[in-house]
Amino acid sequence: MKDIKIMIIDDDPDTLIILKTVFEYVGFKVIAVDDKSKCISELEKGFRGVIIIDINVPYLNGWNTINDIVLNGSMSGNKLIIISSEKYPDKRVEEFGEYINDYIIKPFDFEYLINSVKKSLLSIDNYNTIST
Protein backbone atom coordinates (compact mmCIF):
# COMPACT_ATOMS: atom_id res chain seq x y z
CA MET A 1 0.00 0.00 0.00
CA LYS A 2 1.16 3.52 -0.74
CA ASP A 3 2.13 5.87 2.05
CA ILE A 4 -1.37 7.28 2.39
CA LYS A 5 -1.52 10.13 4.85
CA ILE A 6 -4.21 11.75 6.89
CA MET A 7 -3.74 14.86 8.99
CA ILE A 8 -6.25 15.32 11.80
CA ILE A 9 -6.61 18.80 13.28
CA ASP A 10 -8.61 19.00 16.49
CA ASP A 11 -8.17 20.66 19.87
CA ASP A 12 -9.64 17.69 21.76
CA PRO A 13 -6.87 15.22 22.70
CA ASP A 14 -9.38 12.37 23.06
CA THR A 15 -10.70 12.93 19.53
CA LEU A 16 -7.15 13.03 18.17
CA ILE A 17 -6.25 9.74 19.89
CA ILE A 18 -9.44 7.97 18.82
CA LEU A 19 -9.26 9.08 15.18
CA LYS A 20 -5.53 8.37 14.95
CA THR A 21 -6.07 4.88 16.36
CA VAL A 22 -8.98 4.10 14.03
CA PHE A 23 -7.19 5.26 10.89
CA GLU A 24 -3.91 3.57 11.77
CA TYR A 25 -5.82 0.34 12.41
CA VAL A 26 -7.18 0.39 8.85
CA GLY A 27 -3.72 1.08 7.43
CA PHE A 28 -3.31 4.83 7.07
CA LYS A 29 -0.33 6.91 8.16
CA VAL A 30 -1.74 9.58 10.48
CA ILE A 31 -0.45 12.92 11.67
CA ALA A 32 -2.46 14.39 14.55
CA VAL A 33 -2.06 18.08 15.42
CA ASP A 34 -3.87 20.35 17.84
CA ASP A 35 -3.23 23.79 16.39
CA LYS A 36 -2.86 25.79 13.19
CA SER A 37 0.90 26.34 13.42
CA LYS A 38 1.57 22.59 13.61
CA CYS A 39 -0.75 22.03 10.64
CA ILE A 40 1.03 24.68 8.55
CA SER A 41 4.40 23.25 9.59
CA GLU A 42 3.39 19.76 8.36
CA LEU A 43 2.19 21.24 5.06
CA GLU A 44 5.48 23.11 4.65
CA LYS A 45 7.31 19.81 5.20
CA GLY A 46 5.38 18.43 2.22
CA PHE A 47 2.34 16.72 3.71
CA ARG A 48 0.00 15.46 0.97
CA GLY A 49 -3.25 13.60 1.61
CA VAL A 50 -6.52 14.20 3.40
CA ILE A 51 -6.86 16.87 6.06
CA ILE A 52 -9.65 16.24 8.57
CA ILE A 53 -10.33 19.47 10.43
CA ASP A 54 -12.72 20.34 13.24
CA ILE A 55 -13.92 23.86 12.48
CA ASN A 56 -15.54 24.47 15.88
CA VAL A 57 -12.59 24.83 18.18
CA PRO A 58 -12.19 27.85 20.48
CA TYR A 59 -8.57 28.83 19.84
CA LEU A 60 -7.89 27.04 16.55
CA ASN A 61 -10.65 28.55 14.39
CA GLY A 62 -10.89 26.00 11.64
CA TRP A 63 -12.08 28.50 9.04
CA ASN A 64 -9.01 30.71 9.57
CA THR A 65 -6.83 27.62 9.32
CA ILE A 66 -8.48 26.60 6.04
CA ASN A 67 -8.11 30.16 4.72
CA ASP A 68 -4.40 30.20 5.62
CA ILE A 69 -3.84 26.79 3.99
CA VAL A 70 -5.47 28.01 0.76
CA LEU A 71 -3.69 31.39 0.75
CA ASN A 72 -0.41 29.60 1.47
CA GLY A 73 -0.88 27.55 -1.71
CA SER A 74 -0.83 24.31 0.28
CA MET A 75 -3.96 22.67 -1.13
CA SER A 76 -2.23 21.05 -4.10
CA GLY A 77 -2.32 17.32 -3.46
CA ASN A 78 -4.61 17.74 -0.46
CA LYS A 79 -8.34 17.45 0.20
CA LEU A 80 -10.33 18.63 3.21
CA ILE A 81 -12.95 16.87 5.26
CA ILE A 82 -14.67 19.09 7.80
CA ILE A 83 -16.02 17.69 11.03
CA SER A 84 -18.34 19.92 13.00
CA SER A 85 -20.90 19.98 15.76
CA GLU A 86 -22.87 22.51 13.69
CA LYS A 87 -25.86 20.84 12.07
CA TYR A 88 -25.94 23.27 9.14
CA PRO A 89 -22.82 24.12 7.17
CA ASP A 90 -21.49 27.65 7.33
CA LYS A 91 -21.68 29.72 4.12
CA ARG A 92 -17.89 29.43 3.92
CA VAL A 93 -18.36 25.81 2.82
CA GLU A 94 -19.35 27.26 -0.56
CA GLU A 95 -16.39 29.66 -0.56
CA PHE A 96 -13.93 26.81 -0.04
CA GLY A 97 -16.07 24.22 -1.84
CA GLU A 98 -13.44 23.21 -4.38
CA TYR A 99 -11.17 22.05 -1.54
CA ILE A 100 -13.80 20.43 0.72
CA ASN A 101 -14.78 16.86 -0.06
CA ASP A 102 -17.16 16.32 2.85
CA TYR A 103 -18.84 18.05 5.78
CA ILE A 104 -19.52 15.56 8.58
CA ILE A 105 -21.60 16.37 11.64
CA LYS A 106 -20.58 15.09 15.06
CA PRO A 107 -21.17 12.55 16.36
CA PHE A 108 -20.17 10.72 13.21
CA ASP A 109 -20.09 7.15 12.05
CA PHE A 110 -16.50 5.89 11.77
CA GLU A 111 -17.25 3.73 8.75
CA TYR A 112 -18.70 6.74 6.95
CA LEU A 113 -15.64 8.84 7.82
CA ILE A 114 -13.24 6.13 6.63
CA ASN A 115 -15.14 5.81 3.34
CA SER A 116 -15.14 9.59 2.94
CA VAL A 117 -11.35 9.61 3.36
CA LYS A 118 -10.99 6.86 0.75
CA LYS A 119 -13.17 8.79 -1.72
CA SER A 120 -11.20 11.96 -1.04
CA LEU A 121 -7.93 10.16 -1.72
CA LEU A 122 -9.29 8.92 -5.05
CA SER A 123 -9.83 12.53 -6.07
CA ILE A 124 -6.17 13.37 -5.46
CA ASP A 125 -4.03 12.73 -8.52
CA ASN A 126 -1.23 11.14 -6.50
CA TYR A 127 -3.53 8.47 -5.12
CA ASN A 128 -5.28 7.08 -8.19
CA THR A 129 -4.92 3.50 -6.98
CA ILE A 130 -5.61 2.77 -3.34
CA SER A 131 -5.75 -0.66 -1.85
CA THR A 132 -7.12 0.06 1.64
Image: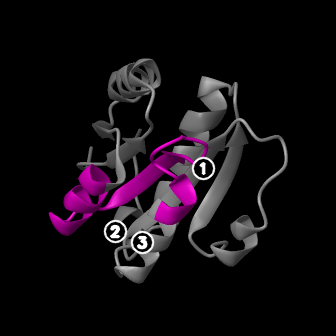
Numbered disc 3: secondary structure: helix
Q: Residue at x 33, y 37 (%)?
A: 28
Numbered disc 2: secondary structure: helix
Residues at badges 1 and 3 in contact (C-beta under 8 Å)? Answer: no
Closer to the chain start, of discs 1 and 2, is 1
Residue that carries the numbered disc 3 in the rendered image: 68
Residue 126's disc is: 2
Q: Is residue 46 above or below residue 108?
A: below
Rendering coords of residue 106 (x, y %): 69, 30
Type of amino acid under label 1: Ile
Q: Residue at x 42, y 71 (%)?
A: 68
- Residue 27 lies within the magenta run: no
Rendering coords of residue 103 (x, y %): 69, 50
Numbered disc 1: secondary structure: strand
Type of amino acid under label 3: Asp
**Magenta span covers which residues?**
37-64
Residue 82's disc is: 1
Q: CA distance from mark 1 to mark 2?
A: 21 Å
Q: Is residue 16 above or below residue 60?
A: above
For the residue pair 122 and 37, the one nearer the viewer reads as: 37
- Quadrant including the C terminus: top left
Type of amino acid under label 2: Asn
Closer to the chain start, of discs 1 and 3, is 3
- Residue 50 lies within the magenta run: yes
Q: Residue at x 30, y 62 (%)?
A: 48
Of marks 1 and 3, the one in the foreground: 3
Q: Classify 10 Å Cα crowding around label 1: few (below 14), some (14-19), many (20 and above).
A: many
Could you tell whether 107 is left or right of 24 in the image? right
